[in-house]
Amino acid sequence: MPWSVAPLRPGRPWPTAPDPRTLRTRWTTLVHADPSTREHLFRPTRTRTLHTRVPALPSPGHPGTAPLAQESGPCPAPVRFTHGPFDQQWLIPDHRLLDVARPELWRVADERQLFAVEQGCPPKSTGPALTVSALLPDGHPLAGRPGRIRPLYRRPGAAEPNITPGLLALLGKEYGQEVAPEDLFAWVVAAAGPSPAGCVVPLTADPARWARGVELGHRITELTVRGARGGDKPRLPGGRRPYVRAAIPPRPDALRYDAEDESLYLGEGRVSPVPRGAWEFEVSGVRVLEAWFEQRARNGEPGTLEAVRPASWPQEWTSDLLELITVLALLDEVRPDLRELAEGPRLARERLVEARVLPVPPSARRPASVLDHPEEGPDGQLTLL
């Protein structure tokens, strides 16, 4: 998957939040403030100020392109995105708010797209070296250095796979069957591992091991995207599904886990059963559930837009938590089967060179030209690509 993009860099935390109502309130607070207060709330950087003129992002909603100092309209409709490896949050899709928004990713993000996101892997860390998202990911690492974001397709509508030319045909010959782009993506998701140089993916020479890896990768993808592509929402077997046993308080101040009765406590609130594997599931050495809770429990600095947050714990957060516990528990059940994928014979680099798959042509490392619709430039003019 030679075309890759660096993570997004918002430059300020307030345009993202775990719920869309908070974002609308923050936006209203900003555009109704007097000029000096608006500048303080906005948090200018070298890249973005209230007077910066930038083109609109290629996203629905048509956010304005006039400088924010002149903005008085309603909040652009927030969009769902993946924050870090597993946290699904909301973002105001306004280019004026984001220092580095990566428009090339927005152009190819649709209901057919999948993104492979490399994770930072500090020494002795555990957890996956790569995660998958059907939503636009920001690539934020829980720890370590940020990795790259690799879309499966280079154009909207599942057109032009982001795969080294000739590789699918070569693998088809090696395994005696047609290899579809999503099959290779599934293998990448299942077989990727960390290395000092970053995320690496071995290519097995064993057709049986390939088939098993593709099966596991499809399962991991299905669980992680949580029904986003028309599939079913993940569910644990009856009797093992987590439920709220004691109501979560308006402002839970701590998160802890009781392994003896498989209970997750949010302040005085209690959710159970929560399998140990879900609680201990880590990415880059950081527990996913702890990172998820910290995002919702933190209080922003008074007088800033980050301090604008729900007055009490929303029901949607509880639903998201139960779904995340389910996903992590089911992914933990798959992990033992992944170890065998790195074993056995591998396709040699010489074989890839002989088949002219390597070296990768420079054009494959660049984004494709996407001219499906006009894009609005600064002050409402059309952008020429």
Image (spheres, rainbow, N blue to C red):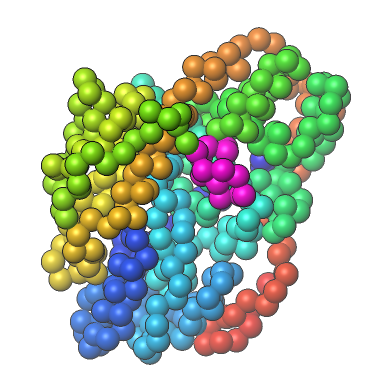
Q: Name the one closer to the observer, 100 or 25.
A: 25
Name which quarter of the figure residue 69 lies in: bottom left
Where is residue 60 drawn, in percent x and y? Answer: 56, 72
Q: Name the one closer to the observer, 52 or 209.
A: 209
Looking at this rendering, what residue extends furthest in the front direction? 238
Residue at image location 56% in from the left, 43% down from the top? 232
Would residue 282 appear left or right of 198 to someone viewing this image? left
The C terminus sits in image quarter: bottom right
Q: Name the one closer to the observer, 354 or 367.
A: 367
The stretch drawn in magenta includes residue 167: no
Majority SS type along the magenta span:
loop
Looking at this rendering, what residue extends furthest in the top direction? 344
Would residue 259 appear left or right of 278 to someone viewing this image? left
Where is residue 109 drawn, in percent x and y? Answer: 60, 58
Looking at the image, residue 275 lies above or below residue 103: above
Residue at image location 23% in from the left, 64% down from the top? 309
Residue at image location 66% in from the left, 45% down from the top? 152
Would residue 72 appear left or right of 359 to someone viewing this image? left
Looking at the image, residue 23 lies above or below residue 231: below
Where is residue 345 drawn, in percent x and y? Answer: 69, 11
Would residue 271 appear left or right of 186 to someone viewing this image? left
Q: What is the magenta range?
A: 221-234
Is residue 188 visible from the viewing direction of this image? no
Q: Name the one closer to the observer, 210 or 171.
A: 210
Residue at image location 43% in from the left, 30% down from the top? 238
Is residue 237 visible from the viewing direction of this image? yes
Where is residue 62 drawn, in percent x and y? Answer: 54, 78
Counting the numbered discs, the total is 0
The N terminus sits in image quarter: top right
Looking at the image, residue 327 lies above or below residue 139: above
